[in-house]
Amino acid sequence: MEVQQWIDKGYELVIEFGPKVLGAILIWIIGSWVIKLLLKGVEKTMERGNYDVSLKKFLLNLLNWAFKIILIVVVLGIFGIGTTSFAAILAAAGLAIGLALQGSLSNFAGGVLIMIFKPIKIGDFIEAQGEVGTVKEIQIFTTKLTSTDNKEIILPNGKLSNDNIVNYSTMELRRVDMVFGVGYDSDIKQTKDILMKELTSHPLVLKDPEPLVRLTELADSSLNFNVRPWVKNADYWGVYYDIMESTKQALDAAGIEIPYPHQVEIHKEG
């Protein structure tokens, strides 16, 4: 008899809640499809409006979350949980959730600040939080970088917006700072002429601002020259490596020694 009662009870539950569950599943599927269409429409509108790539992705991410929350409210409404009750539940849990998600809320606020003040954008090469890489994506809570050795770095927006950021991509021109040390018996004028010739003969080194070569330090074992050419941002590393290599060859050809530690072996006869 008890088994039959359980079967009857189960049947009643299926009759009562079955259509609601099916309706909720159907609405979730259709709603998710509609959300995708809406997001695609918004994305196309932003593309026609030439929106900044960083802002576009951030807003799409934000809208995606907002639409899904609305869809969840609609689905809950099918089960008799009204929007008023849902709002009351959220209000009651708001304090606990806020305390538990302080970091996430801080990261969300940081993401908004990044979008407003634009210290970085997608494609920028930056240094922040002890990490260096190219900005790949700015999301609601985090920012993704791609390191120079192709690793993904994820930085929380809260810390990113409240700490120092070195943006190497902002300025059109950059100065390449290098130091070359030569032996104390080297002729200063000859050394400066060789260093300057290597700079002025490179096709990517700019004539304005003028490159600089100066003796800046009388070190323990070398005369140190600061070598500072100006280049376009995109040419920085190419010029750096070229000048390093060509200058070494030019100094060797002129018989100017670049000091390095020497090891002296002492043989003891016993």
Image (spheres, grey):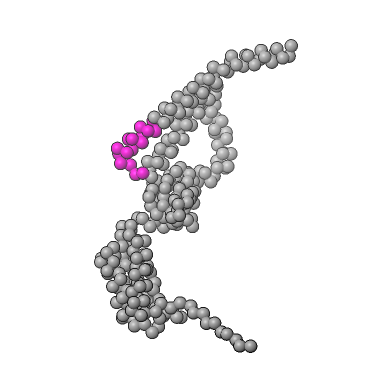
Question: Is 55 drawn above or below residue 147 in the view shown?
Answer: above
Q: Main secondary structure of the magenta part?
A: helix
Q: Residue at x 30, y 60 (%)?
A: 232
Residues 263 and 138: in front is 263
Q: Which residue is most to the right?
A: 1
Please provide percent x and percent y for residue 54.
38, 45
Q: Is residue 174 magenta?
A: no
Which residues are drawn in magenta? 38-53
Q: Quadrant of the C terminus?
A: bottom right
Q: Residue at x 44, y 50 (%)?
A: 145
Q: Residue at x 31, y 80 (%)?
A: 190
Does residue 157 appear in the picture of this structure?
no
Question: Is 34 drawn above or below residue 104 in the view shown?
Answer: above
Dividing the picture into quadrants, the one containing residue 201 is: bottom left
Please provide percent x and percent y for residue 13.
62, 16
Q: Residue at x 57, y 35 (%)?
A: 93
